[in-house]
Image (tube, rainbow, N blue to C red):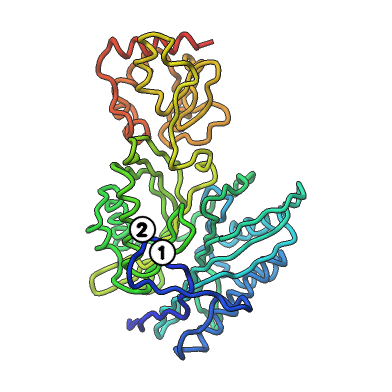
């Protein structure tokens, strides 16, 4: 199969704010025509694609589910990641329900296109294209009547050309640094009926996660294609990164701000069209912040990645990650806290508890911070504190097994969390306390708040 060279139709995103030389930027014209042709490269394909993108947004603004349905593929390979949902959706029926839920809960929608980039990959068997763009979304919450604004909603859309028309196969949108309303509905998750088995794509995806864990720029550079067209939307940054140098600078920034990164609970679905593949899913992120050693835990980063097969194997050409709704309870740059009790007045036991206080609170004013509060922990089932939404999948499994906290189980947990639950955030951030006398002091201290 011969793949023609991908081409950029427009490069209008603010590429980066890290001062990388050679950055090319642009702006939308006064008419809001943010995705415009550059040059005379296959104008029919790109004009049709631009029209499909505009029609998608018109259906969104008018809350027209019928028109939206006309724009999407209808097979189980369709997928989406919406700003306020905690998981990816697979299959058109689930995607349709997500759109319908949005239409039912927001009205008076106004969309203004700010900037965008189109990349097309075509051959004799068809074409795949992806659009990365930025939009201003305004509307009114139907139930409360309160207006809202998403000033810079970043989106990734993947289109497939079938029977002479472009159809959407994947949609991913989020607003950086803005907490969306937590989703109150959970759709019945339907995996693709015929899962794609693509071991080479999965191996390339695994290399990406290994580069993250190892904080290796060399490994990360090796997994990305060497192209000016590669792009990345990082979870907590308000611009897209365009071009290999800019994309790598974004990973360098992440690595430099953390001295230890852990990646667990990777979930993904693989979609394959010739020499283009994309993975949709999520992963759990742990880190120790470089400046002060504070523990950062993000239970779920929802992610879309696009890969291209080259002579050197599968390489990344686009990454779009965003922090799931529940994780926004705590700012990533200020995770942690101290116990709700006055540490200077409670004696030596409380000084030992200081080892736990980076993530947990205990005492009359204790609340949930990085970890849940520890008031009344004895006899409590694991993973059961109300209003705490950041439990790891490992703790949830213990809860489902009926595991409860006693003096014995807590002693085992504090001694070596990795032994009890290897992939938990605490196992990553807390090495354990081998001194039995110190563990006993902590347990006795916690018992003073057991009622």
In this rendering, does residue 3 appear at all? yes
Task: Identify the element where label 2 is drawn.
Answer: helix
Q: List x then y, in percent, for residue 392.
A: 43, 36
Q: Nearer the viewer, residue 386 or 401?
A: 386
The quarter of the picture where the N terminus appears is: bottom left
- Write the residue at 58% across / 68% down: 74
C-alpha span from label 2 to label 1: 8 Å
In this rendering, does residue 195 appear at all? no
Of pointers 2 and 1, the one earlier in the residue sequence? 1
How many neighbours does mark 2 have within 10 angstroms: few (below 14), some (14-19), or many (20 or more)? many
Q: List x then y, in percent, for residue 317.
A: 36, 68
Seen as rendered, the residue at the extreme bottom is 40
Q: How many marks?
A: 2
Is 310 situated above or below 186?
below
Task: Identify the element where label 1 is drawn.
Answer: loop
- Write the residue at 46% across / 21% down: 339
Q: Nearer the viewer, residue 381 or 5?
A: 5
- Write the residue at 40% across / 86% down: 124
Judged left or right of residue 416, residue 120 is right
User: Can you tell which quarter of the image residue 98 is in?
Assistant: bottom right
User: Tags 2 and 1 in contact by the CB under 8 Å rule?
Assistant: yes
Tell me the residue that label 2 is attached to: 250
Q: List x then y, in percent, for residue 252.
A: 30, 55
Judged left or right of residue 181, residue 15 is left
Is 191 situated above or below 345?
below
How many neighbours does mark 1 have within 10 angstroms: few (below 14), some (14-19), or many (20 or more)? many
Q: List x then y, in percent, for residue 243.
A: 36, 70
Judged left or right of residue 326, residue 212 is left
Judged left or right of residue 166, residue 252 is left
Tell me the residue that label 1 is attached to: 16
The quarter of the picture where the C terminus appears is: top right
């Amino acid at each position: 199969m011969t793949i023609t060279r991908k081409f950029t139709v427009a490069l209008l995103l603010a590429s980066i704010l890290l001062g990388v030389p050679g950055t090319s930027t642009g702006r939308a014209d006064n008419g809001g025509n943010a995705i415009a042709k550059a040059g005379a490269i296959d104008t029919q394909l790109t004009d049709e694609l631009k029209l499909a993108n505009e029609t998608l947004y018109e259906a969104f603004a008018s809350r027209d589910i019928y028109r939206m349905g006309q724009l999407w593929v209808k097979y189980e390979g369709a997928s989406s990641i919406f700003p306020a949902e905690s998981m990816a959706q697979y299959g058109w029926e689930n995607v349709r329900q997500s759109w319908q839920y949005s239409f039912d809960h927001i009205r008076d929608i106004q969309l203004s296109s700010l900037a965008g980039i189109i990349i097309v990959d075509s051959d004799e068997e068809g074409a795949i294209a992806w659009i990365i763009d930025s939009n201003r979304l305004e509307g009114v919450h139907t139930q409360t009547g309160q207006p809202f604004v998403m000033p810079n909603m970043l989106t990734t859309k993947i289109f497939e050309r079938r029977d002479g028309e472009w159809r959407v196969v994947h949609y991913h949108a989020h607003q950086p640094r803005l907490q969306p309303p937590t989703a109150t509905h959970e759709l019945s998750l339907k995996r693709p009926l015929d899962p794609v088995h693509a071991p080479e794509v999965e191996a390339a995806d695994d290399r990406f996660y290994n580069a993250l864990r190892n904080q290796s720029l060399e490994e990360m550079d090796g997994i990305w294609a060497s192209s000016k067209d590669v792009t990345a939307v990082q979870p907590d940054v308000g611009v897209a990164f365009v071009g290999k140098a800019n994309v790598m600078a974004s990973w360098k920034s992440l690595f430099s701000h953390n001295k230890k990164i852990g990646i667990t609970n990777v979930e993904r679905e693989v979609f394959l069209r010739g020499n283009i593949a994309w993975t949709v899913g999520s992963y759990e992120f742990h880190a120790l912040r470089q400046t002060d050693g504070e523990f950062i835990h993000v239970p779920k980063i929802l992610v879309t990645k696009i890969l291209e097969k080259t002579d050197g194997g599968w390489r990344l050409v686009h990454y779009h990650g965003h922090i799931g709704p529940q994780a926004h309870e705590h700012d990533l740059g200020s995770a942690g806290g101290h116990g709700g009790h006055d540490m200077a007045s409670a004696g030596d036991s409380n000084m030992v508890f200081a080892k736990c206080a980076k993530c947990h609170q205990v005492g009359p004013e204790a609340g949930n911070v990085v970890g849940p509060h520890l008031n009344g922990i004895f006899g409590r089932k694991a993973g059961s504190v109300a209003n705490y939404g950041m439990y790891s999948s490992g703790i949830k499994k213990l809860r489902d097994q009926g595991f409860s906290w006693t003096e014995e189980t807590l002693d085992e947990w504090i001694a070596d969390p990795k032994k009890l639950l290897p992939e938990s955030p605490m196992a990553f951030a807390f090495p354990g306390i081998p001194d039995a006398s110190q563990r006993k002091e902590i347990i006795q201290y916690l018992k003073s708040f057991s009622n």
